[in-house]
Amino acid sequence: MSAAPPAEDLFSHLLAACDDDWAAYVRHPFVRALADGSLPQACFRRYLVQDYLFLVHFARAYGLAAFKAETLGDIRAAAAGLTAIVDRELDLHVAYCEGWGMGADQLGAAEEADATVAYTRFVLEKGLSGDLLDLQVALAPCVVGYGEIGRALADDPATLRNENPYESWIEMYGGADYQAVADAHVDRMSEIFARRGGPARLSGLVATFRQATRLERAFWDMAFATAAAPLA
């Protein structure tokens, strides 16, 4: 059995163990098409609808994180995440979708795609059956992955900036505010790993991270492959 990495290196360990799956996710054709503006807008609208439903379940995940908390600090961190989604991110997402011709009623009435069900329920199941560390690792491909994607697109001189319909999305996830969210999640995992980690945990955490990463890639697949499909 390999030795546990230092607590601050947990996320690096997960990435190294799942590098092929991670690359397939963060460099997905959907992401590359955002960068050059070539993504069909029907695909992006499909993504936006499903991402709204995704956020609703992620709010539930942060509520579960509070239940799984062991310290007051854990509860406060979970409450902050829940408040951010419910009181800010969902409203911002709806406002953003209105710019793409979709209102709150349409978003709320949409049917979840199989890929949306798969990842969100996986996250919740990991949180229910495991502890707070399992839940945080299951959330990481979304929370941290979007930060890496946004930063990479924002920093790449090849990314189309003028007349790219997805420039505001790139700016949002590549900007300092979201980068701070992603960094905080990495730090939070390290903190919890220091309390609840050890060599015996690593194989299970890697398996969770790998599966969650694959499910995030499937979410891109769903949106990228459905240009002609209904939005719901």
Image (cartoon, rainbow, N blue to C red):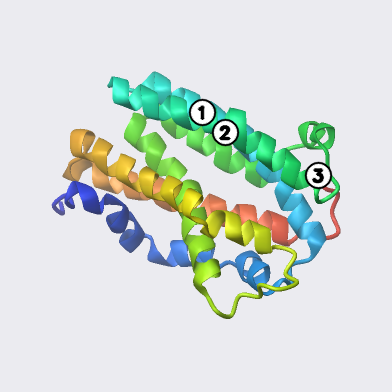
Q: Nearer the viewer, residue 122 or 166?
A: 166
> Which numbered disc covers residue 85?
2
Q: Are marks 3 and 1 in contact (CB under 8 Å)?
A: no
> Which numbered disc covers residue 183?
none
Q: Regarding mark 3 in the picture, which secondary structure is present there?
A: helix
In the rendered structure, which amino acid carries the disc numbered 2? Ile
> Which numbered disc covers residue 98?
3
Quadrant of the image for the C terminus? top right
Is 99 left, or right, of 29 in this rendering? right
Query: Neighbour class for label 2 at 10 Å: few (<14), some, many (≥20)?
Result: many
Closest to the camera, between mark 3 and mark 1, is 3
**Location of residue 146 in the rendering, given as x and y in whole percent from the top left corner:** 52, 54
> Which numbered disc covers residue 82?
1
Q: Is residue 226 visible?
A: no
Q: Are marks 2 and 1 in contact (CB under 8 Å)?
A: yes
Q: Regarding mark 2 in the picture, which secondary structure is present there?
A: helix
**Location of residue 53 in the rendering, given as x and y in whole percent from the top left corner:** 68, 37
Marks 3 and 1, how far apart at CA:
23 Å
**Location of residue 143 in the rendering, given as x and y in whole percent from the top left corner:** 48, 47
Asked where in the image residue 200 lies, by quadrant, the reply is top left
Marks 3 and 2, how far apart at CA:
18 Å
Q: Nearer the viewer, residue 38 or 176?
A: 176
Reply above or below: 17 against 193: below
In the rendered structure, which amino acid carries the disc numbered 1? Leu
